[in-house]
Amino acid sequence: MAMQRGVLGLLGPNGAGKTTLMQMIATISRPTSGTIFFDGVDIVQHPEKIRSCLGYLPQDFGVYENLTAFEFLSYFGALKGVHNRRRIMEMLELVNLHTESNRLTGTFSGGMRQRLGIAQALINDPDIVIVDEPTAGLDPEERVRFRNILSDIGIGKLVILSTHIVSDVEAVATHIAVMNHGRLIASATPEQLLRLAQGSVWEAVVPSEQFDALRARFKTSRAVRRPDGVHVRVVNAEPPVDNAVPAEPDLEEAFIHAVNLQRKSGG
Amino acid sequence: MTLPFERIAAIVRTELRFRFRRNTAIVTLLVVAASVYLIVPDIGSGRTLMQIEGGRVLYNSAAVALGTGMFCALFLSLAGFYLVSNSFRRDILARTGFIIAATPVSDAEYIIGKFLGNAVYLAAIMLACMTSAMVMFLIRGEGALEPFTFLFTYGWSVVPAIAFCSSAALAFEALPVLAGRLGDLLYFGLWGAMLGFPIALFVGQSRPEWLSMIDIVGIIPVLVQVRDRFHSTSMSIGSSPYDASLPPVLYAGLPWSWGIIGERFSTLILPAALIMVARQWFHRFNPARIKSSARHGSRNVFVRTNALLKPVTRFIDPLASMIAGSRASFSGAVSADILATLRLTPLTTISIVVFAIVSLSVDSTSLREGVLPALFLALILALADGTPRDRSAGMMGLIFSAPNLRANYVLWKFTSALCVTICFMFIPAVRLFFAAPSAAMSLAIGSLFTASAAVTLGVLSGSQKAFIAVFLMLLYVSLNSSNFPAFDFAGFHARATAGIQLAYAVLAALFLLAGHLRHRASLKKL
């Protein structure tokens, strides 16, 4: 798998290995086999090559509760070679925490901590940004704000974004990798992934009493109860019921389709 | 471009911010100041800081600096370890370790930064001790204050002790088998051995070349000086009685020479080796290695033993079902916490049974002098994690949602700790009640004191280390001070007077109050 500049969206069910892959690229874990190259250098053997230009926000992220936001950021800035006070304040402003710079992080809400995590990941103006579930805990406004930040960064750098929220990937990813059971099962642009799922998404209206049976047999991506029955979208190669009509797939359905294909091929 | 020393400086700065913003720092500084007050007694009281051959040593700058400096070295070489031995664990618990691992900071820079952070923090405690000693000198001294004598003497005696425990803390944390309570216990044993072994060799007229390397508090050069100068090896440091009929002894200070300084420098070889051990075994927050040490502790002997003994807790299950049937109540919550302690650490359950059997099968003197100290050691380990475990497991929110526990958290934890303590102490207390009622009273009050201190130190520090450090030291002092009834907190020597027993009861109440007030203050921040 090769990664270029832009935003790479990493999708996969729970336990697919997304976090493990990100930890290996961030040089926290060592792969049991295989290699990872960055700019032609094997970073498994020479991790320092990537660490100097890396920004990483792990999924399970916390703060030192008795440090202020400014102190927290200046600590990680110093570890990454940033000592400029103005740069630290810029980062706090970027994540909308500049008015809270002297507050202890122990008093921050989950969303504020997450924003501080995003700021530390970006403080050294990294060439590679790895963010694992970055929008968890953010309110809708902050989520949009963060997506825009990632989009802007992705123009000149590589951003690897892992999330369960497909709409986040949909909004910013220029490339998508789908993982399952520790394997890469698809790597394509969003358009290519959507094209692959073309003809495999069906829309139908089924009576309420048949819905459970349908859901048990097929992968349903959406279901809405209406007076005339349950309006359901199904991801399947064949029409799930007689009255099903083909529908335009969205990214979530393209993801389900890719995982389905892998399961059927026994991979 | 960041130079390594800038990254190291950032780590040291942050370490100091963490440590000085914790309540433990204030408590430690207060304990140090109070201890200096106690060990430099008024000579009119019949006690003195130093005595040689029964005669009191004049309170000049050299004597007060050496006496308090040796105390400081002793204190920091033991308590210092527990005060600073959570550097890696804190980064794991704060969930910032992965970020640090992904930065350009090298393993060596990180370890050196942590070591210096530990050392500077302990050096600040040393300065507090030295300042307190100088203040005491101004009050009780018998000569001119010589600040440089204090500075050189403290530097000579305390700095190697600081270097040793700062590096040992990192090495113990890095080695999976020594991380956790087993390491805490083994360090106590190591400290005792490193203190006693050089003295034993000296008394036995043996002085191998490597002796100075393990003499972390610098007692041997002092003993040599006293032997050469006063033709005696009988001396004591710390508040001790003296013979007022003997003329005061003048102690002129350490015989400064390159030899004595070089000898002390050789003590730094051990810390350097320990730093290399820490560097070699540092996990750099690799999830696979953390799982096997700090978080899951599969290689930690205590954790493994508890896991192996887990089936023993099946015998507790019938009791648990009885409690499950009752309505939500404070007593029900207490029972649930006791059961949690017994289920989490089957070793505690087994220790209770074993000590009960042993307590029934020895005579009352052996029970008091032999079994009780071991029993308290087991109790300290059993109670240490009772309060901190809630916070480190992220359970505080869940616990506070239960009826009555938010406001009465400290009382709840104390009642639970007291019940576990009673399980340990019931049989010895009953036996002593008939054989030595005063010792039984001391044991009862000592149990109360231990349980309340376990809870409050857990609440104040958020870690088990503070309680383990304070109580291991208290246990050590108590067992080695048979002539000093004030330290007989649990009746080991049956020497405590009613006044001393009352003082420990008041201390227990004060501990509880402090814990409760701290908890209330923390609730306001939520």
Image: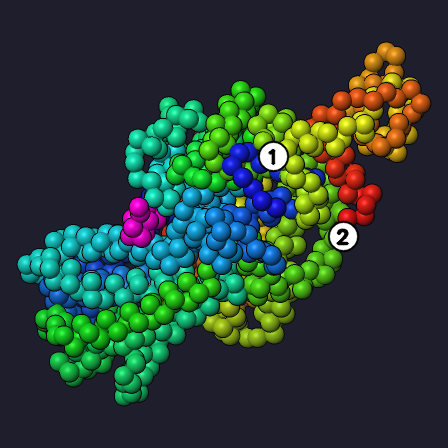
Q: Secondary structure at mark 1?
A: strand
Residue at 60% in and 57% down: A34
Q: Is residue B155 above or below residue A64?
A: below
Left or right? Give the position of B122 relative to A258.
Answer: left
The subunit letter for the residue under badge 1 reads A
Q: Residue at x 34, y 29 (%)?
A: A89
In the rendered image, residue A221, in percent from the top left (x then y), is placed at 77, 27
On screen, residue B97 versus residue A197, left or right, reads: left
Real-space Cα separation, disc 1 to disc 2, in angstroms? 58 Å
The amino acid sitting under disc 1 is His
Query: How are the residues colored?
Result: rainbow
User: Can residue B11 be found in the magenta stretch?
Assistant: yes
Tell me what residue is drawn at x 65 percent, y 61 percent. Answer: B307
Q: Against A141, is B4 above or below?
A: below
Residue at mark 1 shares a chain with residue at mark 2: no
Helix, strand or loop status at disc 2: helix
Q: Residues within 10 Å of mark 1 (few under 14, many from 20)?
A: many
| Magenta residues, start to end | B1-13
Question: Within the magenta stretch, is there residue A41?
Answer: no
- The x and y percentages for residue B395 are 58, 41
Chain under numbered label 2: B
| View extreme (left): residue | B144
Residue type at the position of mark 2: Pro
Q: Label 2 belongs to which residue?
A: B318
* Left or right: residue B199 compared with residue B404: left
